[in-house]
Image: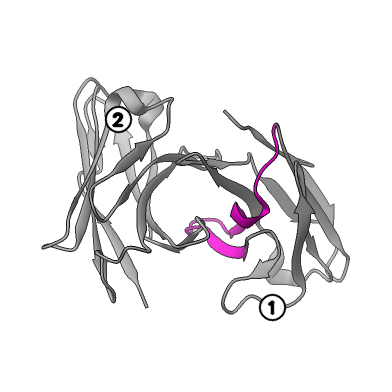
């Protein structure tokens, strides 16, 4: 079973700063099936990035994704107040879905 | 625009079976590109995939839950359902239903429903 490890667990940054979130897989993952979500308190997760680097509908271009193999990154170029939230990576493979443990981006 | 809505009891007793239904609107539940799933989130914790089902009825489950989970689909009612048996307090969580498309990401979600396991 592939495990996704997200780091750091918590990222403390100020609005306007750049956020870099990591998602590391225990085995190689197809970049076609590596996705990222944002979740705010009391809300369902929202798809941000699919297939490693494609932005979902309505997602601003300050969000970007990259990576391959076992290492993937979500970057928020300049944090807006509404970006402080928890972010999850997720992969699909062999008829199974797996989520990472999440990274909380909090206001410093 | 797809919309999903979970329904079911908010309180279940330990050792009983939990049943939830997700009703789909705004689109077809029978498309070959659609995959319907259940995800849960214990209070204060992360997301856990429970299982997914194709419109044809082929279902896939999280190995850690497989022995207790059944997911089914009723295309005539535009619904898919989750049954989790022998529940314990560890199954207390917000349960989400969601749709995944060709890239196997979850692009549409229900609002979630809190299920508490307690006597």
Vertical placement of residue A71 versus A17, above or below: above
Residue designated by label 1: A60
Left or right relative to A33: residue A63: right
Vertical placement of residue B104 versus B29, above or below: above
Q: Is residue A47 magenta?
A: yes
Q: Nearer the viewer, mark 1 or mark 2?
A: 1
Q: Is residue A73 visible?
A: no
Residue designated by label 2: B117
Quarter of the view holding residue B99: bottom left
Residue depicted at x 43% and y 25%:
B64
Q: Is residue A42 magenta?
A: yes
| x, y percent for residue B52 | 36, 46
Specify start and end residues of the magenta stretch as a single range: A27-49
- The quarter of the picture where the N terminus of chain A appears is top right
Quarter of the view holding residue A75: bottom right
Chain assignment, label 2: B
């Amino acid at each position: 079973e592939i495990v996704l490890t997200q780091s750091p667990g918590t990222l403390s940054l100020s609005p306007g700063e750049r956020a870099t979130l990591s998602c590391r897989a225990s085995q190689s993952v197809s970049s076609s099936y590596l996705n990222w979500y944002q979740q705010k308190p009391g809300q369902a997760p929202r798809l941000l990035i699919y297939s490693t680097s494609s932005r979902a509908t309505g997602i601003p271009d300050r969000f970007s994704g990259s990576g391959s193999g076992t290492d993937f990154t979500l970057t928020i170029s300049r944090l807006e107040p509404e970006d402080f939230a928890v972010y999850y990576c997720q992969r699909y493979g062999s008829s199974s879905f797996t989520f990472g443990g999440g990274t909380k981006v909090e206001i410093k | 625009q797809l919309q999903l809505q979970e329904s079911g009891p908010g309180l279940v007793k330990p050792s009983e079976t939990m049943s939830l239904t997700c009703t789909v609107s705004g689109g077809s539940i029978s498309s070959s590109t659609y995959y319907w799933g259940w995800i849960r989130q214990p209070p204060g914790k992360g997301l856990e995939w429970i299982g997914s089902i194709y419109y044809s009825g082929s279902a896939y489950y999280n190995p850690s839950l497989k022995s207790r989970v059944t997911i089914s689909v009723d295309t005539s009612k535009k619904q898919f359902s989750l049954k989790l048996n022998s529940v314990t307090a560890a199954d207390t969580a917000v349960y989400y239903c969601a749709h995944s498309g060709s890239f196997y990401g979850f692009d549409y979600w229900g609002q979630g429903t809190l299920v508490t396991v307690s006597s």
